[in-house]
């Protein structure tokens, strides 16, 4: 396209964005253009990976509008959102209080000069310092979860003077190179090797293995900068560790002088039925990473938070770690509103109550369909259903989508389908999800007389 054509094309999309209604002809062209644009300009692999495209090849579902726990595609078909943007939509889609805060700030000033002090950045840091466990106090704001982990890696290294880390198999901490070094699944790591050296992996939930790695590193003079774990593994399939796991690794880190990093990017802000995942075990980490839900489902926002003692190493050069857009006024407005909504609507309490009820329904379905369901697990509204093999998981996701329910598999355990809705999802919608899942399981069970479990 020449310059004039580019201006016309961009204006066409601006008109689409601002349109209150679209004609059938416009919708058809948007659908065709979107598939073509993904194929030729974005990532054509999405066209084979996304269930919304595969199940509806002739008329794919294009995400268009949403509110609360439901969204509509371009054609007006309505879906119950039980994926929640992988944990982004804890307060639901377009929560009015969060949207208003961002809109009000947008009308005043969207970004900052970065040279003057920004009131909202300070206000959000204060709120996080007050709601996070123990003596966690100082925050640094960025845009996504992997950036929060990158910052935590750097802070742990500069504070301890050590470079080695302990992480977990199937743990997920992001896909930038530092965070990817801590990710415990080979298919995401292998194309980018070599990554950061000195990473030791243990089975998640095995406190003795963590203790052994700390002991061996201490005895050989290597030392460990930090142990990083998710309170409950999300992408591995809602794996809950034994109750003694977090208290034991906290004690071991204290003994060997390693920091303890809690990756709460997915579990934080009420997802598991507590404000933070580590609250289930009364453990205070040295660094806590947040993301996803802290932006209120409206703005990209993440943070890593630590204690005054650890943060003091940054005071001599406060720009040793920086971010152009991290902590911008729009994101901080969303974060302030997200905290307000989380506390005022008791989203953690809602997650605990609704998660317990939903887990009961899933357990009853497992008893009926134990031939195809291997296990159900999780806490709050971070729940996973593990099937006998990946094919079943795929069929269940597809079957639910055809019935108007959006779920998805997990990145490091493809046999597991996650259920991760908004924490304030109405009980009526959860009942509809259970009914749709029951119908889907009947269909899959009848269509697969011979089932072979995938090897572990």
Image (cartoon, grey):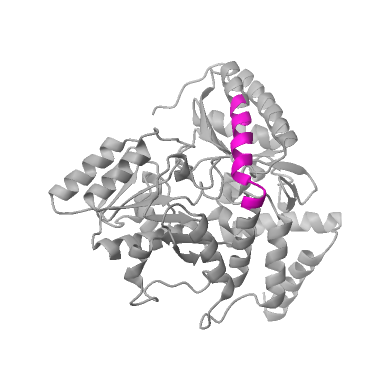
Q: In which quarter of the image is the N terminus?
A: bottom right
Name the side, left or right, on which 297 lies relative to 107: left
Q: Where is residue 250 in the image (x, y as percent from the top left)?
A: 32, 45
Q: Where is residue 285 in the image (x, y as percent from the top left)?
A: 38, 51
Q: Position of residue 234 (x, y in %)?
A: 48, 42
Residue 393 higher or lower than 49, as above or below: above
**Does the stretch in magenta take in 141?**
no
87 and 231: which is toward the camera:
231
**Is residue 266 something that shows in the picture?**
yes
**Does the stretch in magenta take in 351?**
yes
Q: Give the range drawn in magenta.
A: 342-360
Q: In which quarter of the image is residue 441?
A: top right
At x 39%, y 71%, the residue is: 321
**Is residue 407 something that shows in the picture?**
no
303 and 33: which is toward the camera:
303
Q: In which quarter of the image is residue 408?
A: top right
Residue 151 higher or lower than 54, as above or below: below
Q: How many marks?
A: 0
Q: In which quarter of the image is the C terminus?
A: top left
Secondary structure mostly taken by the magenta-highlighted segment of the chain: helix
Give the residue at the far left of this rendering. 220
Name the side, left or right, on which 254 lies relative to 104: left
Q: Where is residue 20 in the image (x, y as percent from the top left)?
A: 84, 61
At x 44%, y 27%, the residue is: 454
């Amino acid at each position: 396209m020449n310059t004039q054509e580019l201006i016309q094309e961009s204006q066409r999309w601006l008109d689409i964005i601002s349109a209150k209604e679209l004609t059938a002809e416009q919708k058809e062209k948007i659908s065709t253009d979107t598939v073509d644009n993904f194929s030729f300009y974005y990532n054509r692999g999405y066209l084979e990976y996304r269930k919304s495209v595969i199940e509806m090849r002739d008329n794919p579902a294009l995400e268009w509008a949403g509110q609360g726990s439901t969204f509509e595609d371009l054609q007006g078909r309505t879906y119950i959102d039980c994926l929640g943007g992988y944990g982004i939509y804890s307060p639901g889609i377009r929560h009015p209080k969060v949207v208003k805060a961002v809109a009000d700030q947008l009308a005043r000033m969207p970004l900052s000069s970065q040279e003057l002090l920004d009131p909202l950045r300070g206000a959000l840091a204060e709120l996080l310092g007050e709601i996070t466990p123990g003596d966690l106090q100082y925050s640094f704001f960025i845009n996504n979860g992997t950036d929060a982990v990158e910052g935590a890696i750097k802070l742990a290294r500069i504070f301890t003077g050590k470079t080695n880390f302990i992480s977990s198999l199937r743990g997920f901490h992001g896909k930038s190179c530092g965070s990817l070094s801590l990710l415990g699944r080979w298919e995401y790591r292998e194309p980018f090797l070599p990554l950061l050296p000195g990473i030791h992996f243990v089975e998640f939930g095995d406190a003795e293995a963590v203790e052994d790695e700390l002991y061996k590193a201490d005895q050989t003079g290597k030392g460990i900068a930090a142990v990083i774990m998710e309170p409950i593994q999300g992408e591995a399939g809602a794996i809950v560790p034994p109750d003694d796991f977090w208290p034991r690794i906290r004690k071991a880190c204290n003994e060997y002088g390693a920091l303890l990093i809690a990756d709460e990017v997915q579990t934080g802000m009420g997802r598991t039925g507590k404000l933070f995942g580590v609250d289930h075990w009364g453990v205070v980490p040295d660094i806590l990473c947040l993301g996803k839900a802290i932006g209120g489902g409206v703005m990209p926002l993440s943070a890593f938070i630590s204690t005054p003692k650890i943060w003091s190493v940054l005071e001599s050069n406060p720009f040793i770690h920086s971010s152009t857009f991290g902590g911008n006024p729009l994101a901080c407005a969303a974060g302030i509103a997200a905290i307000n909504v989380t506390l005022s609507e008791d989203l953690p309490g809602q997650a605990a109550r609704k998660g317990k009820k939903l887990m009961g329904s899933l357990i009853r379905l497992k008893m009926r369909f134990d031939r195809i369901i291997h296990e159900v697990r999780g806490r709050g509204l971070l729940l996973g259903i593990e099937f006998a093999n990946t094919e079943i998981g795929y069929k269940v996701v597809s079957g639910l989508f055809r019935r108007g329910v959006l779920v998805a598999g997990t990145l490091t355990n493809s046999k597991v389908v996650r259920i991760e809705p908004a924490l304030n999802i109405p009980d009526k919608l959860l009942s509809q999800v259970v009914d749709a899942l029951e119908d889907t399981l009947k269909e899959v069970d009848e269509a697969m007389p011979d089932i072979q479990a995938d090897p572990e």
